[in-house]
Amino acid sequence: MKRKISIRTLFVAVLILSSKNARLQINSYPVNQTVTISSGSFNIDVDNDSNDDYTFEILPLSGSSNAARVISLGNSQVMDGSTFGYPDALNFGDNVTAPYSSGNAVLGTDVGGGGQFTGAGMKYLGLNIDISGESHLGWISLEVVASNDTIILHDIGYNTTANDGITAGLMSTTSVNETSLIDLEIYPNPCQNIIRFDWPNLASSIRYSISDLTGKLILNGEAYRTIDVSTLAAGTYILTIAEGQNSVRKKFKKN
């Protein structure tokens, strides 16, 4: 049985204001879908233009083996640096960049190369989405269980500006929910050149990204408790911190 996601009520837009008009920048929304053999394949129309862009499915193999895979539809593609159709499993903050491949791509399987997503926890799949004949970069966060018989789809995001870059996990920031089970403290706030952050049980560097209020990525990398923001212009920004499957976003101001 095939199902199709409707994102009309989930569609979140970020407006970048210019002197003449406004244009969309980053769209992101929750998918919250689990794909199994019994559930059937799951189609997703990323930009809600009535054309499906990707299909996620569990393909039964011989015996009790399974293949978790994604199928690119039309001219859409997935980020794939391999030569065997095993797309790249990205971490939060990784750049979504070429090369890309079309057709069937194996996220995880019991045979062959295994795939990069099998039992790896939440990872990001880079997307090269065809929207009205133009290339738009995006990502989808997902998990493939170790038995390769279940795909858990979490969130999806894409840059509405054609041929513009995006990093895995970059989300729209029109409304930033600063309530989280993980307590993230940023200080000083407002800041000058350095911001410090407290993250529970922090033992090593963790990944971060800083975006402006339009969703445009400004800085990203790894840090341990301090981040140099001296190159930022004065203004308000969004700090996103991620460790494993945990992430949280907070606003801060640079004077």
Image (cartoon, rainbow, N blue to C red):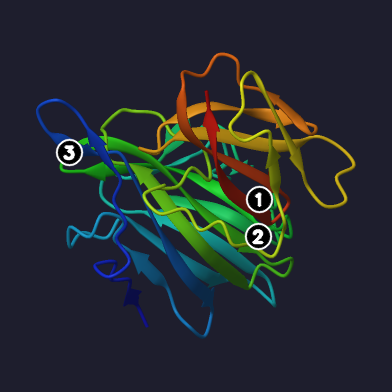
Q: For the residue marked with disc 2, what is the amino acid?
A: Thr
Mark earlier in primary sequence (3, 1): 1
The percent position of residue 169, horizontal first and vertical second, equals 53, 46
**Quadrant of residue 111 within the rendered picture:** bottom right
Q: Nearer the viewer, residue 167 or 97?
A: 167
* Residue assigned mark 2: 109
Residue 3 image-quadrant placement: bottom left
Residue furthest out toward the left: 20
Q: Which of the numbered marks, if any, corresponds to residue 76?
A: none
Q: Are marks 2 and 1 in contact (CB under 8 Å)?
A: yes
Residue 98 seen: no
Q: Residues within 10 Å of mark 3 (few under 14, many from 20)?
A: few
- What element does badge 1 sit on? loop
Q: Where the N terminus falls, by quadrant?
A: bottom left
Q: Position of residue 190 (x, y in %)?
A: 58, 32
Sequence-wise first label, 2 or 1: 2
* Residue 101 seen from this side: yes
List x then y, in percent, for residue 153.
52, 65
Say which of 184 and 8 sits in front. 184
Q: Residue at x 41, y 49 (%)?
A: 157
Q: Residue at x 68, y 71 (%)?
A: 65
Crowding around mark 2 (Cα neighbors within 10 Å: few <14, some 14 to 19, many 20+) is many
| Residue topped by disc 3 | 133
Relative to residue 234, is residue 197 drawn left or right? right
Helix, strand or loop for disc 3: loop
Q: Which residue is mark 1?
A: 115
